[in-house]
Amino acid sequence: MIITSQGFGHFTQGFNNQDFGIETSRMLLILDGCSGAKYSEVGTRLFAQLFSRKEDADNLENFENNVKSVFDDLINNVKNYYPVQKDLEENFIMENLLFTIIACFETEDEYIVKLFGDGYIITQNNRNKISFLKFDYGPCPPYFAYKYCDIETFKDYEFKTFKFNKKTFPKIAISTDGIMPIAKGNVKGVDSILLSGNESSIEMCIKAKRQSFDDDVTIGMFGGN
């Protein structure tokens, strides 16, 4: 299941929810648009639509190649409209394609997370202890789109891969960094049901405390009801 909620800060500033997610039986994919990019909610939705149409899109082995292929197609198809590299970067890539990519795959024995950018992995171990693994790069996180720009920032950065054995970690979730108020303990009551699988309860709890979340919140986990 994937749960998403617009951040109260974005609501008051007139921003759309810049997060987006898709799910299949073996993959969860969450995209977190950059707040400073003018059309990042367009980029996340466009990328997700095209990615989901790739052959065998939710195949773990093909995932990174599929991500690159979609970016290649997107950028090559708009180059006629932005023939000057500087214009392509500043007016298309930087305005539309800056977003974090977090994917989780379920195999028989493991959960495997692929992450490019910032966000959270939430784990519940076999003693029912919940932990928040935070990946934070400050105001300038790495974005895959930088690979198509003439800048050195994160030029050589690649996907990070994390594996969780199901015997040790029966449940995990992935989340955008909008979940930070829960991870820091500033929002009470949500963490206790976060990995319960009860989608309606989690969603209601987050929305009831909506004013505590400045940024958009998107959570993905396997299972749910």
Image (cartoon, grey):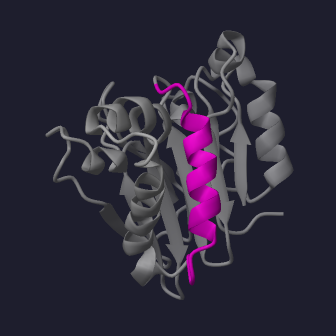
- The answer to whether 93 appears left or right of 169 in the picture is left
Total numbered badges shown on the rendered structure: 0
Residue at 51%, 66% in the rendered image = 104
Q: Quadrant of the N terminus?
A: bottom right
**Is residue 10 left or right of 85 when viewed as pictured?**
right
Which of the two residues, 160 or 86, is positioned nearer the viewer here? 86
Observer able to see residue 175:
no
Residue 225 coordinates in the image, percent (x, y): 84, 63
Q: Which stretch is magenta?
A: 37-57
Q: Residue at x 40, y 83 (%)?
A: 61
Q: Quick check: 112 above or below 101?
A: below
Q: Is residue 142 visible?
A: yes
Residue 128 is situated, as x and y percent measured from the top left of the image, at 57, 59
Magenta highlight: main SS: helix
Does 113 appear above or below 13?
below
Give me the residue at 56% from left, 83% from top: 56
Name the residue located 74 percent from the left edge and 60 percent from the top edge.
197
Whether residue 42 appears in magenta in the rendering, the answer is yes
Q: Where is 95 relative to 62, above or below?
A: above
Q: Nearer the viewer, residue 208 or 150?
A: 150
Residue 18's place in the image compared with 54, above or below, is above
Q: Residue furthest bottom?
A: 108
In the orientation shown, which residue stands out farthest toward the top? 12
Asked if the stretch drawn in magenta spans residue 189, the answer is no
Q: Nearer the viewer, residue 197 or 43?
A: 43
Q: Give residue 133's position: percent from left, percent from top.
A: 40, 48
User: Residue 146, how many percent across, how many down?
Assistant: 29, 44
Please indicate whether residue 119 sits to the left or right of residue 47 in the image. left
Which residue is at the front of the view, 188 or 116?
116
